[in-house]
Image: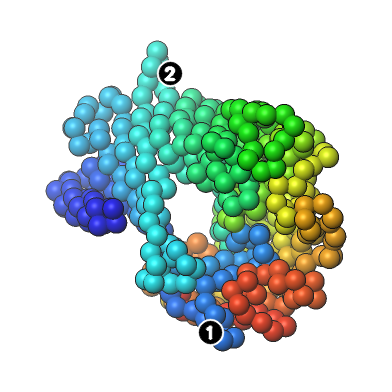
Amino acid sequence: MQKLLFSFLLLSIVTSLYAQEEEEEPIQKNKQFEFHSYGRIGVSSSVYEEKVGSRLNLSSQGAIGGRFEENDYIEMTVVANIDRLFEMEPEQPKIKFVLTTQSFSGDNTFIANNTVINFAEMYLDVSDTIFNVPLNLWVGSRYYRDRNIDMADYWTFNNLTGQGFGLTVGNTQLAFVSSLVLQDQPNNPYGDELYEDGRQKHILALQHRYHLNKHNTINFLGEYHFTGKDSLDDPVFIKDRVSDFGFVVGAMHLHQKGNFLNNASIRYGTRIANGPGDDGWSSRTFINFGNPNQTGQYIGAYGLNITENFVWDVNQKWGIMGYSVFRYAIGARNPVFVNDQRPNEKWDFTIGFRPQLYITDKLQMIFEYHYQIRDFEEYSNGIVGYNPGLGMMNKFTIAPVYVPSGERKLMARPHIRLVYTLAFYNDVVKQNGLSQYYEAGNAGDFGQYLGLKSEWWF
């Protein structure tokens, strides 16, 4: 399978390069084939006993808290512009096929040690006019999301990445996303391991973008989640073969003027739409949190997600970006604990800043700070709970950066960085091993990371 995949990608790249040589028009959107990529890869060490492959952030928080210590990861995307391939007339539909692969290390070390490859996107996208109404339609599996906090690797507000279809008319988007059970996480009540057939979840999402003026836009979001009927293997609930549902509402404000961009969002979800659970990397509402009640339903569950993010290229000498994320979630009333260590309530707060100095065009310096606090509960035998307190982290990074393009911009890529990070934890984190640094087998009163990393996107 991997050989077939690499052969397909190689053929696509070669075809793309050939098509670009033959194409007279220099505009990228008119190419028959396009190739895009995002990736980060390098060498690293935790300094202590050479343990490799773990972030210094608090456990079960995903990348929130800083991403410089993230493991190797590569995406490769091939776009076939079918209307150009078939030499269709300009007034005919615009058609493209998109295929994106994900590559990462399967054992949390280096990608060369154990490479895992899967398809992240595979969909057909059509822009057409029907009954004099311009519209866009996609069908397949895709990254269905909008804004992210780059320095925390956190996709905010409306991340519904999955398999389904979507329709856009003007500033309004409608999508139906299903086949989400494959993206569930271990110990999730809707995962394959606990349900007899693997309870499937479906989402109907409506978004509308309203432009206040040329600098300000508001995006409104509404979601309806529902499941088919299924039964849990363990524990066995009083009510057999039960279904469930949930709702999400939210708003996101985008302000952009000159070299300053600010994005803020708030989102509230109920019942099975109370995510994000501990999904490891983002804010997907369908990764619900907590435990169900005796009927296997999430009556009384809800979640709140609030984010703030800004990127400011101040001048040709320096720039700064920052963010904050607050999340609260609670499971069903009168819960039945489906896992010995699965809590029914949590909240966390994270804040970070990254000033970047442009020493020369190609030599730049990044300084980064993150503060993270997390309240949590642990359970013994699914019945007795105790709260060990607040887990807390302060993390500092210094990273000299080589920027081959010579751009004096915060989002310029590619980067080659020499990264040193130092994280300080409170006693709750150290005593309970509540950081990925300790989970990797490290010890000590603080965490360290040293790495030479590259990152690119195009």
Q: Nearer the viewer, mark 2 or mark 1?
A: 1
Residue 202 percent coordinates (x, y): 56, 31
Give the number of marks: 2
137 and 22: which one is in front?
137
| Three-letter code, disc 2 | Val
Q: Which residue is mark 1?
A: 50
| Three-letter code, disc 1 | Glu
Residue at the image position 73 percent from the left and 39 percent from the top: 292
Q: How is the image coloured?
A: rainbow
Residue at the image position 63 percent from the left and 40 percent from the top: 233
Residue 25 at least partly seen: yes
427 and 88: which one is in front?
427
Q: Which residue is mark 2?
A: 133
Q: Quadrant of residue 116?
A: bottom left
* Tag 2 secondary structure: strand
* Tag 1 secondary structure: loop
- Tell me the CA gap for discs 2 and 1: 60 Å
Q: Quadrant of residue 128?
A: top left
260 and 327: which one is in front?
327
Q: Residues within 10 Å of mark 1 (few under 14, many from 20)?
A: few
